[in-house]
Image: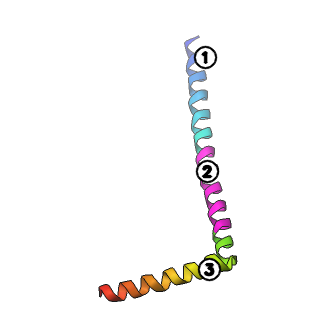
Amino acid sequence: MLRNLQKNILVVLVMDWVVSFVNIFLVSLWSHVRWSCDFGWRIQNPVIKEHTERYNLFTIKLNKLKL
């Protein structure tokens, strides 16, 4: 009886670990895919591309002024 209970507890703990690992993997995969799609969309969208280029130029000028 006690041995069976220990076995069941071990199975539950292992399954919990597996589910947690799979969950973390899927969340990180989803965020990577979402970031990749968002990044590709930003590059292809001319308005956002121009805004990003302006922001980058502004940041470079600001950094030069700080030096």
Question: Relative to the observer, which residue lies in front, 67 or 2?
Answer: 67
Circle nearer the N terminus (1, 2): 1
Magenta residues (range): 22-38
Q: CA distance from mark 2 to mark 3?
A: 28 Å
Say above or below: 10 vs 47: above
Label 3 Cα neighbours within 10 Å, binned few <14 / some 14-19 / many ≥20 = some
Q: Quadrant of residue 34?
A: bottom right
Circle nearer the N terminus (1, 3): 1
Circle 1/circle 2 CB separation < 8 Å: no
Q: Which mark is residue 49?
A: 3
Spot occupied by residue 27 in the image (x, y as percentages of width and height): 61, 50
Viewer-side label of 1, 3:
3
Q: Which mark is residue 57?
A: none
The residue wearing badge 1 is 4
Give the secondary structure at mark 2.
Answer: helix
Q: CA distance from mark 1 to mark 2?
A: 34 Å
Query: Given the image, on which type of amino acid does mark 1 rest?
Result: Asn
Q: What secondary structure characterizes most of the magenta part?
A: helix
Which image quarter holds the N terminus?
top right
Q: Quadrant of residue 17?
A: top right
The residue shown at (43%, 82%) is: 59
Label 2 Cα neighbours within 10 Å, binned few <14 / some 14-19 / many ≥20 = few
The residue wearing badge 2 is 27
Viewer-side label of 1, 2:
2
Circle 2/circle 3 CB separation < 8 Å: no
